[in-house]
Image (tube, rainbow, N blue to C red):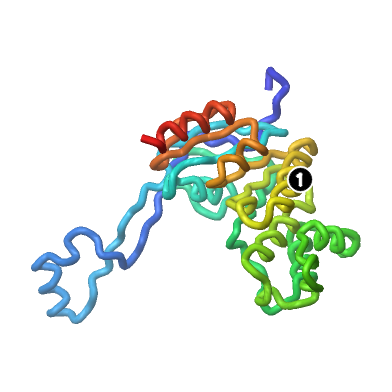
Amino acid sequence: MADGRVPTVIVDDVHVVYRVHGARGKGASSPVASLKRMVTGKRLASVVEVHAVKGVSFIAYRGEAIGLIGSNGSGKSTLLRAIAGVLPIERGTLYTMGQPSLLGVNAALMNDLPGERNVALGCLAMGMTPAEVKEKTAGIIEFSGINERGEFSSMPMRTYSSGMAARLRFSIAAAKKHDVLLIDEALATGDARFRRRSEQRVRELRSEAGTVFLVSHTNQSIRDTCERTIWLESGVIRADGPTDDVIKEYERFMSK
């Protein structure tokens, strides 16, 4: 780039459409449809389309932490999953540097395995060597704080509270340097001390030349962590700029 910044994510006129099969769409209860069901004895398959992201465009650069805000159903999590490659895009173009890592509150861990084993599996899945896993495991568990009230790291994940599990997920993901790290609501869980540790780790990831996207319903987490914020509403970008400016605009909109 002419200004020296290195793009890590390029989103150009991206659309994401969900198709819900078997839903009761328009005409499902019409007389003709009812007669067909009576004659054939079969339910008519119907498809409902949800246009979740509508022509979104932006560029993210190395070293940025970008907040994603918007009301429920605005398309924030959908956009993150599209960037991660979990959801296909309907049309448009999406480029990423390397393989983005998506961290969500509902990210899967093995409930029947102890926390320390999940740490090992998670680190191996991120491409660490067994030697690196052995070196980092104790630090990951300490960072998560799951042992502060007992030796939970040796207990099955099903015995963990939702907050403990979310802290462990974040700690695993944050143990590795990422070109692009996508965080979906993970900083909204846990106590204030863990949130401070998490926010500091996000700043460190940025300083290591990574790009971080953070989805949160807690505007203060966005303010504390991100210098740039994108506001999505009904699948469309309403604002993209300095965090304080965008959040103030969003809060005025929500207070109407």
Q: Is residue 93 visible?
A: yes
Q: Secondary structure at mark 1?
A: helix
For the N terminus, give its image quadrant: top right
The residue shown at (78%, 47%) is 177
| Percent x, y of residue 226 | 64, 36
Residue 86, above or below 239: below
Give the residue number, with chain letter if any, for mark 1: 201
Left or right: 130, with 161 as reference point: right
| Residue 119 vertical placement versus 126 (above, below) | below
The percent coordinates of residue 240 (x first, y second) are 52, 29
Determine the image quadrant of residue 202: top right
Tell me where residue 39 appears, x and y as whole percent: 13, 79
- State whether residue 63 is above or below residue 153: above
Is 113 displayed left or right of 17 in the figure?
A: right
**Residue 157 occupies quadrant:** bottom right
Give the residue displayed 68% in from the left and 33% down from the top.
64
Quarter of the picture holding the C terminus:
top left
In the visual, does 223 lie left or right of 128? left
Residue 90 visible to an observer of this rendering: no
Q: Is residue 114 left or right of residue 105?
A: right
Amino acid of disc 1 = Arg
Viewer-nearest residue: 178 or 68: 68
Q: Residue, x 89% and y 64% (percent of image)?
A: 134
